[in-house]
Image (cartoon, rainbow, N blue to C red):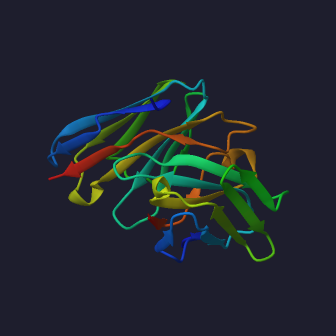
Amino acid sequence: ETGVTQTPRHLVMGMTNKKSLKCEQHLGHNAMYWYKQSAKKPLELMFVYNFKEQTENNSVPSRFSPECPNSSHLFLHLHTLQPEDSALYLCASSHGGAGGNTIYFGEGSWLTVV
Amino acid sequence: DQQVKQNSPSLSVQEGRISILNCDYTNSMFDYFLWYKKYPAEGPTFLISISSIKDKNEDGRFTVFLNKSAKHLSLHIVPSQPGDSAVYFCAASEGTPDSWGKLQFGAGTQVVVTP
């Protein structure tokens, strides 16, 4: 069982829908991340949270809205997405601070926008 | 502008032989490097890492080599096994504390290990 759990694993949504992706880490880490992998592109960092505070927003459109209520949970709220937003969304966590360079990924949520 | 490049999209190797995966980077501020392995429909799994103060790190069948002057690293898998068939990603980050965890990834190399 992975230490980082993502739900749902698959999501199909219309462009006018509102949905959320959920991530939970059981590793005692303090930093959590959202990465995105689009077809034929490298993984791209979207957001970073350290100790529940957002420390990085990598120029992500506002139709993606992250939420980190505590160090173990991370959400990605989705609203009025476009078909080109269809991708694999990966949550990850790390220790944060010194030694926080190795991040551990969840299984990913496959999103299809129709 | 891609700062981490894996120029070989695929690699086929016979079981028992050595797999060598290559990665080049352009950012001289990178000082921590990682390799991840990814099976279809799963998230990337951390394999091995190396910091810039070393030129080699070994973990079982996996060895990573770093050549800082050439801005090049490689992953050696010896011996290759069928279960090693997967996509391998090279990743790097800078050394400043606010860069920890912010990884730049290569596009990946698909490895196929044949019997």
User: Split into 4 quadrants, where in the image is the N terminus of chain B?
Assistant: bottom right
Residue A43, position in %: x, y?
A: 47, 57
Q: Indicate the position of residue B5 as horizontal and vertical percent values.
A: 57, 72
Q: The C terminus of chain B lies in which quarter of the figure?
A: bottom left
| Residue B51 seen anywhere in this rendered image of the structure | no
Q: Is residue A64 above or below residue A96?
A: below
Q: Is residue B113 left or right of residue A87?
A: right
Residue located 79% across and 70% down the image: B68
**Is A50 rendered above or below residue B35?**
above
Residue at the limit of the structure toward the right, as seen here: B53
In the rendered image, residue A110, in percent from the top left (x then y), is placed at 29, 47
Q: Is residue A18 visible?
A: yes
Residue A15, horizontal then vertical, whole percent: 16, 49
Write down the quadrant of residue B92 in the picture: bottom right
Pick the front one: B13 or A56 = B13
* Nearer the observer, B39 or A30: B39
Say above or below: A83 vs A98: below
